[in-house]
Image (cartoon, helix red, strand yellow):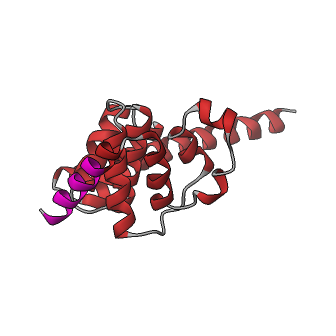
Amino acid sequence: ERRVRAQKENEKRLQEEIKKIKLYKEKEQTAKLESLATQGNAQAQFKLGVMYESGEGVIKSQKEAAKLFLLSAQQGNAQAQFRLGRMYCSGRGVPEEIKMAHMLFNIASTMTESIAISYMDFLECISNDELLVDTSFLESITTVGGLRDYLERRMTKSEIEEAQQLALELVQS
C-alpha cells in the first residue's frame, strides 16, 4: 500500500514537472515569436496573431490579433489577409466593414487560391437571414475568391468598385 501511494505521488510530481517544462517552453517560444514579430517578420506576426485570436499561450485579444494580422498582411501574407478579412466580416477586433473584408479577400485570392475555407470561416461572414432563405450557394464557396464573391451579394455596385480600387491601390503600392 505504501509502495503504491509512493508510486502515485512520484507520478504526480513527474506530471507537474512535465507541465512546468511545457509552460516554460511555451513562454520561451512566445517570447521568440514576439521578438521576431517586433523585428517585422511577417510569418511570426501571423503566428502570434493566430495565438492571440485563439488565446493559445497568450491572453486572448481580438484587437491584438487584428493588429498583428494587419502587419503581416501589409507584407503580403495571404493567410493574414484572409484572417483579417474574416475579422472585418464579423467585427471581431475591428469595426465590421464589408468593403475592407472584400478588399482583403480580393488581395488574398490574387496571391493564392489554396487557402482552405472552413464552414466556420464562412459562417462568420454570412447573415443568419440569408441562411434561412437560401442555402444553395454554400457548396460553391470553397476559396477566398468564392467568399469575396459571396460578399458582393451584400454590397452595392459602388461599394464593390471602391473595394476593388482599394485592393488595386494596395497591391500596386
Residue at image location 87% in from the left, 33% down from the top: 1
Viewer-side residue, 123 vs 37: 123
Q: Is residue 139 left or right of residue 36?
A: right
- Where, by quadrant of the figure, is residue 10 drawn? top right
Q: Residue furthest left?
A: 173
Residue at image location 82% in from the left, 33% down from the top: 2
Magenta-colored stretch includes residue 171:
yes
Query: Residue 112, how many percent across, how many down?
Result: 40, 69
Viewer-side residue, 125 vs 82: 125
Residue at image location 59% in from the left, 44% down from the top: 120
Looking at the image, is 57 positioned above or below residue 150? Answer: above
Would residue 146 be visible to someone looking at this image? yes
Viewer-side residue, 98 vs 113: 98
Q: Residue furthest front?
A: 157
Q: Is residue 141 left or right of residue 32?
A: right
Looking at the image, is 160 positioned above or below residue 76? Answer: above
Viewer-side residue, 47 vs 144: 144
Would residue 28 be visible to someone looking at this image? no
What segment is highlighted magenta in the picture? 161-172
Magenta segment, prevailing SS (helix, strand or loop): helix
Query: Residue 75, how many percent across, how many down?
Result: 21, 60
Please identify the quadrant where the C terminus is shown: bottom left
Q: Is residue 4 left or right of residue 152?
A: right
